[in-house]
Image (spheres, grey):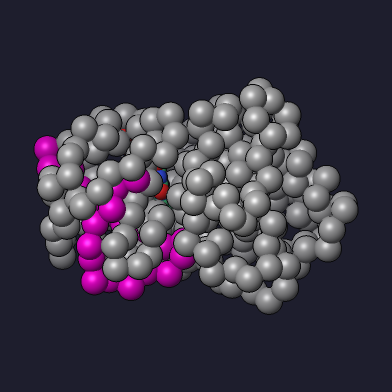
Amino acid sequence: MYRVVVIKDIVDEAKNVKTFRFEDDSRPSPGQFYMVWIPGIDEFPMSISYIGNLKGFTVKKIGAGTSRMHDLHVGDRLWIRGPYGNGFEITEGKALVVGGGSGMATLAPLIEKLDNRDIIIAAKSKDELVFLNRFRDLEPIIATDDGSMGYHGLATNLAEKLLVENDYDIVYTCGPEPMMSAMVQIAKKYGVEIQASLERFMKCGIGICDSCSINGYRVCVDGPVFNSSILFSMTEFGKVRRTPSGKKEELG
Ligand SMILES: Cc1cc2nc3c(=O)[nH]c(=O)nc-3n(C[C@H](O)[C@H](O)[C@H](O)COP(=O)(O)OP(=O)(O)OC[C@H]3O[C@@H](n4cnc5c(N)ncnc54)[C@H](O)[C@@H]3O)c2cc1C
Ligand code: FES
């Protein structure tokens, strides 16, 4: 079930964010994820950030598992299973892509498949912007909460400005849940379709344990990407999540 992959390259992307490149024969689509096992430490979900033969995970250092991963070197091994989940559905027309922080990892392979798109890369501060170099030729619009680079303010305020000034057919978003949940409300206000990639605590990753459930949907198999009609009906999105023990808690 698990397979071993060897790390071929490690790239520093931003503050506390590194990309780990590895060869693997699987054929994921943009928005899908893998379960990554670090023996003795943890197993956790990671979106695929490069989908060619030389694949990539772009990992923000958060806790024990991701910190251990950040300590790995070229030649070290990862145990992975997947790809899992549904991925993004590419729709016709002009897209607005809104990525916050390490949410850009999930959106990156999608951006590379879109012909007609505007891209917002956002973060709290300029040293946390992910994939500026990768997408420089596509002229992304930068937003930082502290104004250290680009638009000074929230990605959602900038996105609303763009939605007023342009005609978009679809918004794709991934990032912190408060950002995505505000983005869903803005898309609803302007009558634009939206797809968002959600994060919930995952154990099995394959629809068995229910730890990732939100309003009766299992994020690992029904998502992680959800479309407008489901997002608009999710009363827990942006408000409630489950802890590792399965208990519901309010999002801070
Ligand atoms: C579908 C999906 C795709 C993801 N893709 C990426 C990505 O591309 N890059 C990235 O940096 N992060 C991604 N994450 C988040 C990543 O899984 C967590 O940051 C990671 O699990 C933290 O583990 P830890 O041991 O370092 O931290 P811990 O200290 O164990 O946990 C810190 C926080 O991370 C989250 N977390 C921990 N374990 C899990 C788990 N098993 N499932 C879900 N969330 C967990 C919880 O919010 C927890 O409070 C993704 C999450 C999901 C659900
Ligand atoms: S992680 Fe087990 S059902 Fe989704």
Quarter-wise, where is residue 196 in the image?
bottom right
> Dividing the image into four equal quarters, which quarter contains ligand 1?
top left
Residue pictured at 52% horizontal, 64% vertical:
112
Quarter-wise, where is residue 32 in the image?
bottom left
Please determine whether, in this image, residue 251 is positioned above or below residue 99. above
Any magenta on residue 212?
no
Quarter placement of the C terminus: top right
Q: Is residue 175 visible?
A: no
Magenta segment range? 19-40
Going by the image, does 23 lie left or right of 191?
Answer: left
**Viewer-proximal residue among 166 and 200:** 166
Going by the image, does 64 lie left or right of 148?
Answer: left
Q: Is residue 192 visible?
A: yes
Residue pictured at 38% horizontal, 65% vertical:
51
Q: Position of residue 111 (x, y in %)?
A: 56, 61
**Viewer-proximal residue among 10 and 201:** 10
Q: Position of residue 216 (x, y in %)?
A: 51, 57
Please determine whether, in this image, residue 244 is positioned above or below residue 133. above
Q: Position of residue 86 (x, y in %)?
A: 45, 68
Q: Residue furthest bottom?
A: 92
Please determine whether, in this image, residue 85 is positioned above or below residue 209. below
Q: Residue furthest right?
A: 165
Quarter placement of the N terminus: bottom left
Going by the image, does 59 lie left or right of 149?
Answer: left
Q: Residue furthest front?
A: 137
